[in-house]
Amino acid sequence: VDRVEQLLWSLPYEFFFDELRQYLACKSIWAKKEAMALLLRTLDLPQVQETCPNAAQRFLLQISESLLPAIDDSDSGVRLETAKCLAILIHRTGSLPEDVVPVLMRIPTTRQGAFQ
């Protein structure tokens, strides 16, 4: 994690997110949960705040699309972590952008209870 934090001083956040996306979609439960935790952690880093201060708002659509398949994962821990991650991201943005609403509407009705 420390090396990732150091790399974010020299890499744009877009590059980091593109690299992280493959771990959000992998089959490993551990990798998915760690990728979500790293995603939330990096948004609070000083280097991300300095280079891309509105990263949560700017990447909300892409992050939501990447996280959406995990909300219906067979592992309850992954589902819970995904719901937590989405809720934190939406809370950080302050308001829900219109382009994200259709993505969130694709959450299966059986899984929407995690947000209530």
Image (tube, grey):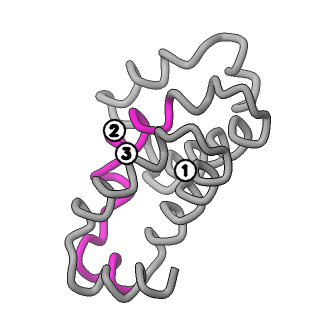
Q: Earlier in the sequence, mark 1 or mark 3?
A: 3
* Snapshot quadrant of residue 65: top left
Is residue 112 inside the magenta stretch?
A: no
Q: Disc 2 and disc 3: Cα gap in Å?
A: 4 Å
Quarter of the figure that contains the C terminus = top right
First in residue order: circle 2 vs circle 1: 2
* Amino acid beneath label 3: Leu
Q: Which mark is residue 91?
A: 1
Q: Nearer the viewer, residue 79 or 44?
A: 79
Q: Secondary structure at mark 1?
A: helix
Q: Magenta span covers which residues?
A: 46-68
SS at mark 3 in the image = helix
User: Which residue was labeled with disc 2?
Assistant: 61
Q: Is residue 97 left or right of residue 71?
A: left
**Up-down relation of residue 111 to residue 83 (above or below):** above
Q: Measured from the top left, where is residue 17 in percent x and y?
A: 33, 57
Q: Residue at x 53, y 57 (%)?
A: 35
CA neighbours of label 2 inside 10 A, class few (<14), some (14 to 19), many (20+): some
Q: Residue 96 appears at what percent x and percent y?
A: 42, 37
Residue beneath the point at 28% across and 82% down: 50
Q: Amino acid at mark 1?
A: His
Amino acid type of the residue tagged 2 in the rendering: Leu
